[in-house]
Image (spheres, rainbow, N blue to C red):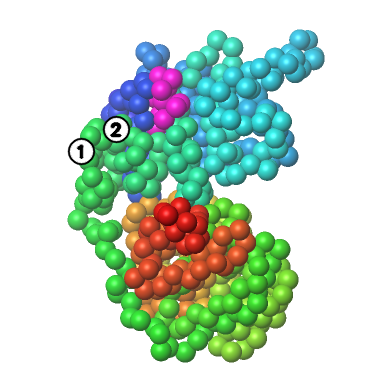
């Protein structure tokens, strides 16, 4: 890639990018929101045309810009965050959708299709049943199916470059290793891999080369040999942020504070009855692998997921079961993990999304008080560093993932809740947005809010939490606190009980 630039309305999204991706190597691409990663990928895929003067060659063949067909015929393949799989179809069908089914006249050659699909799964090193429904697979397996589909070339084509756009962003901690192994196997077939991620540990484990973008420019491009995590952080943010600072050290021990949230014998279809007290100013983490029940805990407390039994109280006032509106009125708010489907309304403006939880605050019959609403939005944009800072009237869909997350967090912080619950608060966001969101959660706790954080990121839970609930097989099996809240302890306890661990040691 030589001298790639892209300007939108006079604003440079990409500025003179030069980059070489070697066959058989994994090349990590890092950068914050707005750094140019998405623009670069869209140029490669044929979605955007760059400014005049740039060029891209894939295995010696020059890419025709603005042409998805040219991108594909050159050997470029893409796996996006939205995998585009059909849950109700089989693995075989989903893999074959990438290249088309072999036919004789109007008849699908089923045996040939199966042979090709199995070959693609084998090439990626995947041991998956071709007849299994995709909807029954784990998140990592679904991503692997998307990789296999991308590697299934039509007749006469050869896959030379695979671009993975944050493939681990939605994966639980225990499934990341599985996908990283697949990425290594793919590169061993002399396929160049561009690996876009925010998770530095994964870069250190799987990448051969790394390039860092900032404000559309290449800040660094080098081999991984000898590179440390702290050096990667410095390349990403310079001197702006010490990301390794222990956030929990900033919080006082809330042991004597009043209880803000009480849960007794709460159960759902996937979680056995559990009890929980969370004090004002306390941050409690919720940990567990996929299928452990972790994903259902916060939703059941809030009322977004059906509660079979049990009682929830906010400041000793009982909540009506399965009634999110009453929960909000009582001072409990919940930011779900699925920001694009359950968290926000992509077609509404940032300003409207921010106001949704407190519409009555700006409503004076028969109109909304837009001036007050704009002032409120400007305050939160400034406080959370939302970019563009003058984009309050833009639709939520126009913002990067990290900025969408900030806007949705602002919506709930604006409610001044007694209990703030967030599920995967920093999933798929860059390191700066992650730090800003963490600071806001800590700030909420300092102001006396009880905070619950459910996350597949163990580092995040350990950095933030006074206590961590451990879920395994649908049960809250343990609560770690104080010096026991370590990455090793949380990771081990989500996989194996203390008794089993001691038994193995003996």
Q: Residues within 10 Å of mark 1 (few under 14, many from 20)?
A: few
Asked if residue 103 lies in the magenta stretch, the reply is no
Task: Kindly identify which numbered label has been placed on residue 226.
Answer: 1
Q: Is residue 187 magenta?
A: yes
Binning the other alpha carbons within 10 Å of mark 2 as few (below 14), some (14 to 19) or many (20 upward) gives many
Q: Please, is residue 379 above or below residue 184 in the view?
A: below
351 above or below 221? below
**Disc 2 target residue:** 209
Residue 115 percent location from the top left of the image: 66, 17
Towards the viewer: 233 or 414: 233
For mark 1, give the secondary structure: loop
The C terminus, quarter of image: bottom left
- Identify whether 20 is placed above or below 455: above
- Mark whose residue sits in front, 1 or 2: 1
**Residue 259 shows in the view:** yes
Res 383 quadrant in image:
bottom left
Lateral position of residue 338 relative to residue 425, left or right: right
At numbered mark 2, what does the secondary structure look like: helix, strand or loop? strand
Tell me: residue 413, above or below residue 404.
below
Residue 294 point in image, percent of width and height: 57, 61
Magenta span covers which residues?
Answer: 184-194
């Amino acid at each position: 890639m030589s001298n790639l630039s892209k300007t939108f309305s006079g604003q440079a999204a990409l500025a003179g990018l030069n980059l070489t991706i070697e066959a058989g190597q994994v090349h990590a691409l890092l950068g914050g929101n707005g750094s140019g990663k998405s623009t670069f990928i869209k140029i490669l895929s044929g979605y955007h045309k760059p400014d005049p003067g740039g060029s891209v060659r894939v295995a010696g063949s020059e890419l025709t810009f603005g042409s998805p067909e040219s991108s594909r015929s050159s050997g470029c393949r893409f796996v996006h965050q939205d995998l585009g799989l059909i849950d109700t179809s089989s693995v075989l069908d989903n893999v074959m959708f990438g290249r088309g089914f072999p036919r004789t006249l109007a008849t699908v050659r089923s045996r040939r299709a199966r042979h090709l699909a199995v070959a693609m799964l084998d090439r990626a090193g995947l041991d998956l049943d071709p007849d299994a429904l995709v909807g029954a697979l784990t998140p990592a397996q679904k991503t692997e199916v998307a990789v296999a589909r991308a590697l299934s070339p039509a007749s006469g084509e050869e896959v030379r470059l695979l671009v993975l756009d944050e493939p681990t962003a939605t994966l639980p901690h225990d499934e990341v290793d599985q996908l990283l192994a697949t990425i290594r196997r793919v590169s061993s077939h002399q396929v160049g891999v561009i690996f876009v991620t925010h998770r530095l540990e994964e870069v250190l484990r799987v990448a051969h080369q790394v390039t860092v973008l900032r404000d559309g420019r290449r800040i660094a491009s080098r081999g991984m040999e000898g590179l440390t995590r702290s050096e990667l952080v410095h390349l990403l943010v310079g001197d702006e942020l010490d990301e390794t600072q222990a956030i929990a050290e900033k919080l006082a021990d809330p042991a004597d504070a009043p209880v803000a949230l009480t849960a007794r014998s709460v159960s759902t279809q996937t979680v056995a009855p559990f009890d929980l007290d969370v004090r004002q100013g306390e941050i409690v983490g919720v940990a567990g692998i996929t299928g452990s029940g972790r994903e259902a805990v916060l939703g059941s407390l809030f009322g977004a997921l059906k509660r079979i039994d049990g009682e929830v109280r906010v400041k000793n006032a009982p909540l009506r079961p399965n009634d999110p509106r009453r929960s909000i009125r009582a001072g409990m708010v919940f930011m779900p993990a699925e920001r694009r489907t359950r968290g926000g309304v992509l077609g509404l403006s940032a300003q409207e999304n921010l106001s949704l939880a407190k519409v009555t605050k700006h409503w004076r019959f028969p109109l909304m008080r837009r001036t007050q609403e704009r002032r409120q939005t400007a305050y939160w944009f400034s406080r959370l560093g939302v970019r563009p800072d003058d984009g309050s009237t833009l639709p939520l869909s126009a913002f990067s993932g990290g900025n969408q997350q900030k806007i949705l967090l602002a919506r709930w912080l604006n409610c001044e809740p007694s209990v703030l619950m967030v599920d995967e608060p920093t999933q798929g966001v860059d390191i700066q947005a992650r730090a800003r969101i963490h600071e806001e959660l800590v700030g909420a706790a300092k102001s006396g809010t009880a905070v619950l954080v459910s996350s597949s990121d163990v580092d995040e839970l350990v950095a933030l939490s006074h206590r961590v609930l451990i879920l395994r097989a649908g049960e809250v099996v343990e609560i770690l606190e104080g010096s026991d809240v370590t990455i090793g302890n949380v990771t081990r306890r989500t996989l194996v009980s203390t008794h089993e661990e001691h038994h193995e040691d003996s």
